[in-house]
Image (cartoon, grey):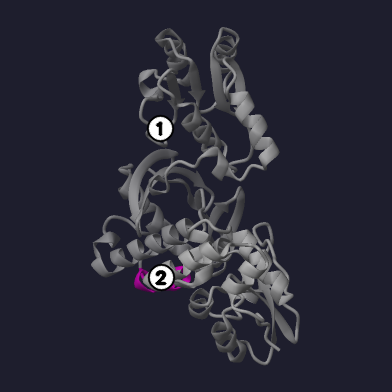
Amino acid sequence: MRPSLKMRLGDLLVHEHMITEAQLSEALNVQAATGRKLGSTLITLEFISEPQLLRFLAQQLKVPFLDISQRRISPDVSKLLSEVYARRYRALVIEDNGDSVLVGMSDPADLRGLDQLAPILAPKRIELAVVQESQIMAAFDNVYRRTEEITSFAEQLHEEYQDVEEFDLNSLGDETSDATVVKLLQSIFEDAVQVRASDIHIEPDEGLLRIRQRVDGVLQEHTLNQVKIASALVLRLKLMSGLDISEKRLPQDGRFNIKVRSHSIDVRLSTMPIQHGESVVMRLLDQSAGLLSLDETGMPAHILKRVRSIIKRPHGMVLVTGPTGSGKTTTLYGALSELNQQESKIITVEDPVEYRIGRINQVQINNKIGLSFASILRTALRQDPDIIMVGEMRDQETVDIGLRAALTGHLVLSTQ
């Protein structure tokens, strides 16, 4: 039996004093002009918040309201419903309980959607749950990955080059195969951007190629049997980074920019010779995403309050620590955004300068010409700063100068 409301949503909300008659009348007028659903219209007009509305609907329909932001959802379970229908009806299969499935929907009152989903998921019975739309959309990006597309391009590339002993500049002359390399890399980058990965690792091993992505600080692995294509990927990435493609014995560092859909991605690339070829690690920085405020970093309210209190002190040192990809730099930039006022001079020492911020003096290190963290930090202290941000403190000299700055009236922000 499908759940249903005993009254129309608007009348029900007024009856339960969630909104007023005047607010409902205004929302209905806006709805008539825009064609949007009443619930979305009420949220847009800020007459009610999305969590308030969904909790209310869940209570009225006698179904659970779930927070899936920290919940691990099996892709195999979610793929019981194809991506086309999942995105169309904003529906996510959360659990498979044998004869039934738990389906989360952002609009549980969408009876038409439920009617469409029932035969698709048959013979399993649908148990409904209410989930915020933003959480469902984020789950879609993690569940419906591009792994099949990546595998398909890898197989195609392997077939095109199956008679070639080793990829080199001569093998790149085949326009068809060259295009396949580009498509494979594009697919890898699109998959990484989709799940908001901070790093991509390409690691050839004996008999297989590992492509790993760091998401929320944890590496997720996808393996390919076509290990031979690893040298083609490395060669193409070196060309994109302007590196020496003939040098395979020494590590190299480079960078390039790539467009992925509407995103502009800055890529920092590092190569390293390993037993079965060259390992490549790429740090991704999405310039299109913009800076996150401290409110958007996901910190609990009581911790956020303490952080704001600390960064507003006139002097001292604040260190943000954590594993790779955990959001250290993102947190520091969020703090700088709040501190960036006309009465304060801020200098940053970074490698590289990740986001460009007006009014802040940002310096990028260049060890080749002697611009190290320590040397720039020493000069920065003569520039009369109020706040200094050091990208990282990993040597004794930088730490010593940073501590002295914190003790002499400066606020120093850094990571370790």
Q: Splitting the image into 4 quarters, where does residue 39 fall?
A: bottom right
Quadrant showing the C terminus: top right
Q: Is residue 145 visible?
A: no
Q: Say whether residue 41 is left or right of residue 240.
A: right
Which of the pair 199/262 is nearer the observer?
262
Q: Is residue 134 left or right of residue 168?
A: right
The secondary structure that dominates the magenta segment is helix
Q: Residue at x 50, y 54 (%)?
A: 196
Tell me which segment is drawn in magenta.
150-163
Q: Nearer the viewer, residue 172 or 21?
A: 21
Q: Which of 156/260 is in front?
A: 260
Image quadrant in which the N terminus is located: bottom right
From the image, tell me which residue sits under label 1.
Answer: 353
Spatial separation of the CA atoms under disc 1 and disc 2: 34 Å
Which residue sits at x=68%, y=63%? Answer: 72
Instruction: Specify the label residue 153 is tagged with.
Output: 2
Query: What percent of the width, then of the height, locates residue 95?
Result: 70, 74
Q: Is 158 one of the magenta-colored residues?
A: yes
Q: Say which element carries label 2.
A: helix
* Badge 2 amino acid: Phe
Is residue 395 rendered magenta in the image? no
